């Protein structure tokens, strides 16, 4: 329909009568005028014009100075468009829209604070201090994972599959059943598809339930059904759990490998609240099959983005054990998690380590009694038994679960929220986002330091307490890291280096690294010959001065030390410079030496390209392109051996230009060194 001549003029006169007396564009009378004006304008089309298509409405909006036309839900003839340029132009756009014959009304949309009318209605939710700490257990207000903030932003982990590798599951549990993918599960202990928990009532000689209660408690922390009016809510109560039954006292390498690679094509997260004994008397590493399964998981799983392996750091803290001595939590391919009390302090059992990424609430460490609220086997078979005092009357749930076994699934739940917000995150991206978004916890602890890339770390806490709200927000806007690269540098490979006996000054070995790598993890492959390794201390110092304590004196009196230690404490630092390893033998009477030492660094190379050409004046010009904000130096060499800095640049908009200031003589090479 086209209106021309006198009829169009009469129609416009009628429209002007409608808006007469209104300051600015028309707003419906029911629209509140408070709130923050946005750059978006809403419009309603006149009767008879509601059937206009998107292209026609878009052309109409473009004439008014707007773009991005979208329908408002299913409301007939109602559209919204975004004012281009200065947001303050939205009011003028609305005025111009009113001059269009098809538009009955137009107004600037305003933003108003909103929050959910209710959080999930699970009756124990108000007691789950790990999700939202209001001091309900006598702890510290805010010493939680900020789950409510992530939920209020709309994230529940919907669509994310989490594999829980554990001892068994109450698959008919009323607060788990709806979120369990039994059809995808498997029992690697019995070799059948039924991952059901087994075992009788009561507790064994170690104080643990005789039945397979561990997996049910872990699964509930991750994804107990939310908003069902029953029990507890999981961190990611919209996610689904794949039950993998494998954990038992004695596991083979093949069982571990099968469990870690289970459904790697479809599973996003693998939660592992288990590991070798935490007795501080041995170094245990995965077998070759389990190691390869994990490498395949991060390399090929989830369509090449990588399965995210979350691992409990270990419960040997009171014995002097360290997560770095555990080849599972110490792996570069996992997210190692420590445990916190309801006051945000390290649980006494939680192991320290330079491989710790983050920590999460768990509790019940002998100093602070409150534990984690979650699902239980019930029927006197789980943690909440008739012989236990002070737990819940409904034995299908417990408030006493603890250990780093409870902390790890907290993080797995947060990762599920992150992947719902951004399914394209790679496994290394997840790791960095968790560390960058973590909250400082136990601020008075003297162990906090800032590394050379501005990230905070602590041997007791990793990067801090996991923060679901901040992690999801960061994840949603995250740009993935470049491909992972590894590089290796020998520190000791020919002549052994003696360690001074009983001398606190120790000895240092060093290597100069010449690489553009932006460091993520650093590994030290070390072989030390010594009659009693409990006398030793080993530290790795980066070129930026970041010190990672990898081995400390403790009760392990075995001879020799052969292990590959991992640290995340240099994450984000440039690799270039001198890396040092300091070894100290604190006790006299047994001499030792470093037989071999090798530094292995993983990270990414700067994605900056250099293109050189002669300009019209005969000068050599280098054009650079890469990630906006990249900082670094251009270096020049005449022989590919000696490199000289010639310029420091910032790719402020993803590009930069360098003009050579000397005449072109002979061959010349240029390279970029990121900072």
Image (cartoon, rainbow, N blue to C red):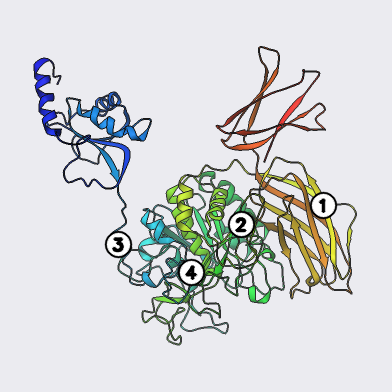
At mark 3, the secondary structure is loop
Residue 215 is tagged as 4
Determine whether, in the image, residue 500 is placed left or right of residue 404: right
Residue 510 is tagged as 1
Give the mark nearest the N terminus, 4 or 2: 4
Q: CA distance from mark 4 to mark 2?
A: 33 Å
Residue 252: image quadrant is bottom right
Q: CA distance from mark 1 to mark 2?
A: 25 Å
Q: CA distance from mark 4 to mark 1?
A: 45 Å
- Estimate the x, y position of residue 84 in percent, counting from the top left: 36, 30
Count the marks: how many? 4
At mark 4, the secondary structure is helix
**Residue at mark 2:** 456
- Estimate the x, y position of residue 615 in percent, counting from the top left: 66, 15
**Callout 4–callout 2 Cβ contact below 8 Å:** no
Mark 1 Cα shell of 10 Å, populated few (<14), some (14-19), many (≥20): some
Give the mark nearest the N terminus, 3 or 1: 3
Q: CA distance from mark 3 to mark 1?
A: 58 Å
Determine whether, in the image, residue 28 is placed left or right of residue 196: left
**Residue at mark 3:** 118
């Amino acid at each position: 329909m086209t209106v021309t001549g006198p009829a169009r003029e009469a129609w416009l006169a009628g429209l002007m009568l409608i808006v007469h007396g209104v300051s600015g564009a028309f707003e419906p009378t029911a629209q509140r005028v408070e709130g923050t004006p946005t750059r978006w304008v809403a419009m309603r089309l006149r009767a008879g014009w509601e059937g206009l298509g998107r292209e026609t409405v878009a052309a109409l909006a473009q004439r008014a100075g707007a773009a991005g036309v979208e329908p408002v839900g299913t409301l007939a003839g109602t559209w919204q468009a975004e004012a281009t340029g200065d947001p303050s132009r939205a009011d003028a756009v609305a005025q111009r829209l009113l001059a269009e014959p098809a538009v009955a009304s137009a107004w600037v949309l305003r933003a108003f604070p909103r929050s959910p009318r209710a959080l999930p209605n699970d009756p124990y939710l108000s007691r789950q201090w790990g999700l939202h700490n209001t001091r309900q257990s006598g702890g510290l207000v805010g010493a939680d994972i900020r789950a409510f903030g992530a939920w209020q932003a709309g994230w529940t982990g919907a669509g994310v599959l989490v594999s829980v590798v554990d001892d068994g599951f109450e698959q008919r549990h009323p607060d788990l059943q709806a979120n369990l993918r039994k059809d995808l599960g498997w029992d690697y202990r019995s070799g059948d598809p039924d991952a059901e928990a087994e075992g009788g009532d009561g507790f064994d000689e170690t104080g643990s339930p005789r039945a397979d209660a561990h997996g049910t408690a872990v699964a509930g922390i991750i994804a107990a059904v939310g908003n069902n009016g029953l029990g507890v809510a999981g961190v990611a109560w919209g996610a689904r759990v794949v039950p993998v039954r494998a954990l038992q006292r004695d596991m083979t390498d093949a069982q571990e490998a099968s469990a870690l690679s289970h459904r790697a094509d479809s599973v996003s997260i693998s939660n592992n609240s288990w590991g070798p004994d935490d007795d501080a008397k041995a170094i245990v590493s995965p077998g070759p099959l389990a190691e390869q399964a994990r490498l395949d998981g991060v390399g090929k799983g989830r369509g090449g983005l990588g399965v995210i392996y979350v691992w409990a750091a270990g419960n040997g803290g009171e014995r002097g054990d360290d997560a770095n001595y555990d080849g599972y939590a110490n792996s570069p391919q996992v997210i190692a998690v420590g445990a916190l009390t309801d006051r945000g302090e390290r649980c006494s059992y939680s192991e320290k380590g330079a491989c710790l990424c983050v920590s999460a609430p768990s509790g019940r460490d002998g100093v602070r009694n409150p534990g984690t609220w979650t699902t239980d086997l019930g029927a006197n078979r789980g943690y909440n038994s008739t012989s236990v005092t002070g737990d819940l009357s409904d034995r299908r749930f417990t408030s006493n679960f603890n250990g780093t076994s409870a902390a790890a699934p907290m993080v797995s739940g947060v990762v599920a929220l992150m992947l719902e917000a951004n399914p394209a995150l790679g496994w290394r991206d997840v790791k960095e986002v968790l560390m960058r978004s973590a909250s400082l916890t136990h601020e008075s602890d003297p162990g906090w330091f800032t590394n050379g890339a501005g990230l905070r770390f602590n041997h007791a806490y990793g990067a801090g307490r996991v923060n679901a709200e901040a992690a999801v927000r960061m994840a949603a806007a995250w740009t993935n890291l470049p491909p992972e690269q590894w590089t290796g540098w020998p520190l000791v490979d020919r002549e052994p280096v003696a360690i001074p006996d009983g001398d606190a000054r120790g000895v240092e070995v060093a290597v100069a690294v010449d690489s553009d790598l932006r460091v993520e993890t650093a590994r030290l492959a070390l072989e030390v010959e010594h009659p009693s390794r409990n006398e030793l201390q080993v530290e790795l110092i980066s070129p930026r001065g970041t010190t990672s304590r990898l081995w400390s004196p403790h009760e392990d009196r075995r001879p020799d030390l052969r292990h590959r230690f991992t640290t995340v404490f240099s994450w984000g630092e440039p690799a270039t410079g001198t890396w040092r390893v300091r070894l100290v033998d604190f006790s006299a009477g047994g001499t030792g030496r470093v037989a071999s030492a090798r530094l292995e660094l993983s990270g990414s190379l700067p994605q900056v390209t250099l293109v050189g050409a002669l300009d019209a004046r005969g000068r050599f010009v280098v054009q650079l392109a890469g990630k906006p904000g990249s900082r670094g130096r251009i270096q020049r060499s005449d022989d590919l051996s000696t490199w000289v800095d010639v310029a420091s640049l910032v790719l402020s908009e993803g590009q930069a230009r360098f003009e050579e200031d000397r005449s072109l003589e002979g061959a010349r090479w240029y390279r970029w060194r990121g900072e």
